[in-house]
Amino acid sequence: MPNLMEITDISKIYGPLKALQNITLFIPPGQWLAVMGPSGSGKTTLMNIMGCLDTPSLGEVILDGERLSGLSPAGLTALRREAIGLIFQQFHLISYLTALENVMVAQYYHSMVDEREALEALARVGLAERARHLPRQLSGGEQQRVCIARALINHPKLILADEPTGNLDETNEALVMEILHGLHNAGATIVTVTHAPEVARHAERVIVLEHGKLVSDQYQTHPSHRPAPQEGGGACRPAGPVPGPDGRAAADGDASGVPGVAGAGEAAV
Ligand SMILES: Nc1ncnc2c1ncn2[C@@H]1O[C@H](COP(=O)(O)OP(=O)(O)O)[C@@H](O)[C@H]1O
Ligand SMILES: [Mg+2]
């Protein structure tokens, strides 16, 4: 099966500063990759390039067979909406919209607003009872789960999460990691950017950046790694419902998987 993403010899240069230097990285479908490194090492820059939010100064990125350098800004945006789900440390929820409406904004960008599907997306992350709450009425963990429901609305082929548990306590970190495990086991390709080893240990492969260079690339086997099924590996359509926060499948889950939602809330990106 071809790689979902092929990054070949990319650099990102800001004047005298090389935020990324000659990075080559191939990501097969279904892989869970953690990107680690100290602050300022280039993690977010790399994730933004993977997520079609930014372009490299040099080098080539191919996502799902599409050469990104050949796309216009509008083409990049379209590909991002279609193929990528973004989860941010800072949540980026719209403060005056309810959880349900925040998910529906993402649907809007796919011209498929459907309240029932949005409610199902929230139910799959254990938030059916919180759908009508505003972000400020939700805990950090609940807000992050709204972001995950929003990121999954388009069945993304690639889920990118930048420090997804950076603002969460241990309990909520565990809930979010459990949801990511559910997605991974269902075949999703996931990249988590983190400086926390306890988050990186969930991934099957860990790369480390230092001063914009890729200094380590290792596969790991450990108790928290549950291998993804090998078939599929395409769009994020889990064969079964994503586990709820308590690890059980959402009660109203169906076999079609996570309902369609948009890439990251466009309002935030
Ligand atoms: N738009 C920008 N203009 C100039 N320098 C930038 C810009 N974005 C990031 N950088 C620099 O690139 C380096 C890597 O940043 P970043 O990717 O955010 O690191 P990390 O996410 O690992 O903390 C840092 O030195 C940062 O200051
Ligand atoms: Mg960063």
Image (cartoon, rainbow, N blue to C red):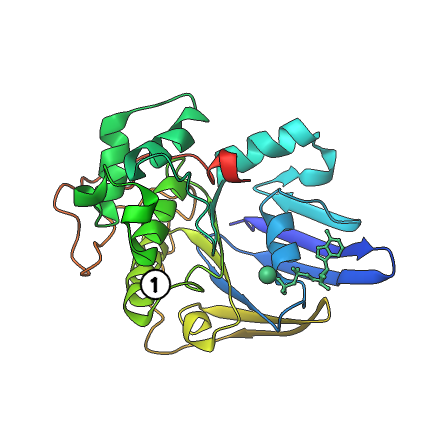
**Where's residue 244, x and y in %?**
21, 54
**Where's residue 33, x and y in %?**
50, 63
Res. 192 visible in picture: yes
- Using the image, determine if residue 27 lies above or below residue 74: below
Tell whether 269 sits left or right of 190: right
**Quarter of the picture for ligand 2?**
bottom right
Using the image as rendered, state which of residue 201 and residue 186 is in the foreground.
201
Name the residue at 86% across, 55% down.
15
**Where's residue 111, x and y in %?**
42, 21
Name the residue at 67% across, 53% down.
7
| The C terminus, quarter of image | top right
Check the image and name the residue furthest to the top.
Answer: 111
Q: Quadrant of residue 47?
A: bottom right
Name the residue at 44% across, 67% down.
203
Tell me the crowding category of disc 1: few under 14, some 14 to 19, or many 20 or more residues within 10 angstroms, Cα based.
some
- Using the image, determine if residue 234 lies above or below residue 102: below
Check the image and name the residue furthest to the left.
Answer: 251
Q: Which residue is mark 1?
A: 177
Tell whether 86 sits left or right of 214: left
Name the residue at 55% across, 75% down.
218
Res. 256 visible in picture: no
The total of numbered circles placed on residues is 1
Q: Secondary structure at mark 1?
A: helix
Tell whether 87 sits left or right of 44: left
